[in-house]
Image: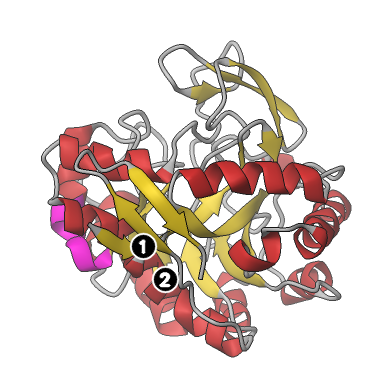
Amino acid sequence: MDTAGLVDLQVNGYAGVDFNDAALDAAALDHALEAMLRHGVTCCLPTLITAPEAILAERLIALDRAVGTSRLGPRMVPGFHLEGPFLNPSPGFAGCHPPEAMVRPDPATLGRLVTGLAHPVLMLSLAPEQAGGMELVRVARALGMLVAIGHSAAGASELAEAVEAGATLSTHLGNAMPHTLAKFRNPLVAHLAEDRLAASFIADGIHIPPPALKVMLRAKGVARAVLVTDATAAAAAPPGIYRFAGMSIEHTENNSVRVPGSTALAGSALSLDQAVRNVVGWGLSEPSEAIRMASTNPAALLAPALATHGLRPPAGRIGWSDTLAPEHVELG
C-alpha cells in the first residue's frame, strides 16, 4: 500500500534530541529528523512548550537556525508549533508546563516571539477563556497560524466563540485536564460536542485508554480526527532519563514518559507509525482510516497556514508493509 507521508503537528523532540534545547544545532536536528523519517514522518512541526518569554525566544531562534542550516529541515519542517505560554495555569490544565511561566494571551508577546524568524510559527495552542484569548485567536489566525485549543478550561459557549474567531483544532484532546470534572458540563464533553473543531489524539494507550479513544473517535469521526505523538527526546530511544525544556523526564519500562518520581505525564515516547498500528490493532479503525488521521487530515488542517506563508503542502510518500510498517519513505 502506498500513501501520503505522515504529518506530525506536535513533536517536542525525538531520538534523544530535545527541540526545546537552546543549544540545538543542525546535526542534532538532522539526527532526529532521520529517525522520524524512518517511522514514516515526512513533515512535522517541532513544538516548543511554555517558558519565560526570553527563554522561549532563545529556543525559537536556535530551532529556526537549526532548521535553516540542516540537511533535512528545509524539506521536512515548514514551521513550528508554539504550545504556550498562553495556557491555563490552573492545576490539572497546566500539565507538565510550568504554570509560573504562563501569561495572559497577548498579541504583543506573540509578535515579539515570531518576529525575525526565517521559518514561521504555523500553529498556536492556547486557552481562549483567559483574558484576551479571543482576540489572540483572531490575531494568530490573521498571522497565518493554525489555531488550536489546549491546556484550557473553556466550556461550550467559549469554544463556540473561539471557533467563530478562527480556532479549528483541539490539542491532544483528553489530556491536560483535571482527573475530576463535572459529569456533563466539562471541557472534554464540550470539545467532543463542537462539530466545527477537529481533534488531535495521542494514541499510545497511556495518554488515553483505548476504550476512551474509541468513544472520542466515534464522536469526532475519522474526518475530524488527527493522530499526533507529542513525542519527546525519549521517542525512538531506550528507557532512561532525558531532558525536555529544561526539566528531566523519565522514559520508563512501560513506555510512558513522566516527571521522575511523579505520576505526571511529560510528553510521550510514541512514533507516529506506531500510533497508526495502535488504533488499527485496538480495532478502532481500518488501516486506510488510521493512515488518513496521521497524514492527509493533519495536512488539510495545516494547508491554510502554509498557503498564507506561500509554502507548499506536504508531498512525501510511504510504501507500507502488510503489518503497517513503513518499507520505503520518500520526501516530496
Q: Nearer the viewer, residue 206 or 13?
A: 13
- Give the vertical position of 35 relative to 243 (above or below): below
Query: Which label belongs to residue 223?
Result: none
**Magenta stretch: residue 319 in it?**
no
Q: Nearer the viewer, residue 52 or 300?
A: 300
Tell me the CA gap for discs 1 and 2. 6 Å
**Please, what is the three-letter code of the amino acid marked with disc 2?**
Ala
Counting from the top left corner in percent of width and height, residue 230 is at 50, 44
**Magenta stretch: residue 222 in it?**
yes
Residue designated by label 1: 295
Name the residue rendered at 49%, 31% in the picture: 269
Farthest front residue? 328
Counting from the top left corner in percent of width and height, residue 111 is at 78, 75
**Which image quarter: residue 95?**
top right
Counting from the top left corner in percent of width and height, residue 298 is at 40, 66
Whether residue 41 appears in this view of the structure is yes
- Label 1 close to label 2 by CB (< 8 Å): yes
Whether residue 202 appears in this view of the structure is no
How crowded pointer 1 is (Cα within 10 Å; few <14, some 14-19, many 20+) is rated as: many
Name the residue rendered at 63%, 82% in the picture: 139
**Which image quarter: residue 240?**
top right
Location of the N terminus (image quadrant): bottom left
Dominant secondary-structure state across the stretch colored magenta: helix
Q: Which residues are magenta?
A: 217-224
How crowded pointer 2 is (Cα within 10 Å; few <14, some 14-19, many 20+) is rated as: many
**Please, what is the three-letter code of the amino acid marked with disc 1?**
Ser
- Give the vertical position of 75 relative to 311 (above or below): above
Q: Secondary structure at mark 2?
A: helix
Residue designated by label 2: 299
Counting from the top left corner in percent of width and height, residue 56 is at 80, 53
Q: How is the image coloured?
A: secondary structure
Q: Nearer the viewer, residue 158 or 50?
A: 50
